[in-house]
Amino acid sequence: TITNAAMFAIAKSKAYADEHVDAFNQLFRFSRPLYKMQPDRRFLWGLTVCGEDTYVCLFMPSKAYATPAMNVRTPEGRRALIDFFVGWSLCEWDRCGYDPSMVLRSIVPRLRRNPIPMAGPSTSETASGSQQPVRHMQSKLTYYEIQVHNYDPESQEHTTRQYFANLPMVNADRLFSRHTRCFSGSFTDPNLRCGYDGRVIATSLLKTGWPESNMDIADDTRDECHMLRKINRILGDDADLNGRYPTLVCGGRARIDLGNGVMVDDSVQSILAEVDTEVTVHRVHKRLVIEPLGEPLNTVRTVRELIMVLYDAMSAYSAIHDRCQILHRDISTNNIIVCRNADGSARGTLIDFDFALDIEREATNPTRYVRAGTVPF
């Protein structure tokens, strides 16, 4: 159900029509934090009222679009503005800019792992001397229920799995970008079992974002899921490299239900399908779940541990390049994580193949000179 709160747009007004440039600049600045505040936000609406002219803006991951000025003094302008508001009030949840496959929930779990007493021992004594059990904490658990669409390239079939995620570890913080977000979580319903700290017991990492992609999934040569499937297939039997690179649990392109069972890839092109405009940068919404779940590189405890973690990550880098013909192209401190073994020892894992290049597939394509990596690396 669409509520008035869902019909959300940043609005800016100016007294005179010739101030629309300043209004647009302020609209850009105020819109940026919303992607961080709303992890289920796919795109943004904006509205400027400058004198008698009204503009409607649409902020996509790569570009902003604006309508021509709708002058409320003219019949044409009033009709255009009314048409917009009527259409906006009747649109579906995804047309408001939200992700319908991602739902925020808040519950009191039925079963909590290692519940903590509110105070004192397991029993307390009343004024009459009788013993009463101490109540355990029953704080609410807030989590996201996210649909992960998995694509099998061999059968070309799409399946869906429900993922239960804690609040984001990494959030989108730019107006125009890949809008990468990362969540820890698992496929186990937290209503059945959750951690003592009131969080989903995390066993894996969900990564979602809007990378530049080829619209044809068969020709999407720089797809991270493709890279990880190839790496897992070639290096999966090498016990020495186990845990030094991510294992893909499932993943693929996020999909939107258009009604009547029609599913399409969630992309900039599908969002703008009814708009008479040319899409210059193709971005597709993708999700993948990977293991293991680790900690940042700065959590190493000793210099020796740091050296071992870096050795593990670089040995994975070399094997992936030499045996899988995949070049990572984004080595940085953010993309090497620390994973703890059962005995407490650390191992390094090389992650984030967003910018990776499949040398075998790229050999058949024209050379493209692009900058890749993380500043200042």
Image (cartoon, helix red, strand yellow):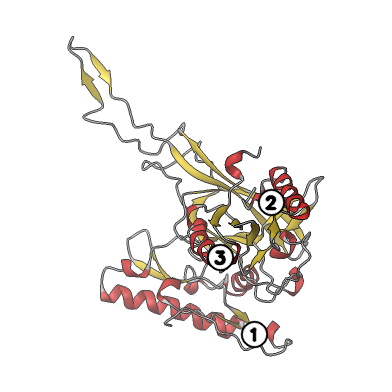
Name the foreground residue: 99 vs 226: 99
Q: Quadrant of the N terminus?
A: top right
Q: Residue at x 49, y 37 (%)?
A: 106
Residue 297 place in picture, x, y as percent: 36, 70
**Secondary structure beneath label 2:** helix
Res 266 seen here:
no
Q: Is residue 221 above or below residue 109?
A: below
Distance CA(mark 3)–CA(mark 1): 50 Å
Residue under label 2: 95
In percent of the image, x 28 and y 76: which residue is there? Answer: 304
The percent coordinates of residue 349 (x first, y second) are 45, 70
Q: What number is the disc on residue 359?
A: 1
Residue at point 55% right, 56% down?
A: 13
Asked if the residue under mark 1 is in contact with the one under mark 3, i.e. CB atoms within 8 Å, the reply is no
Q: Earlier in the sequence, mark 3 or mark 1?
A: 3
Identify residue type, mark 3.
Glu
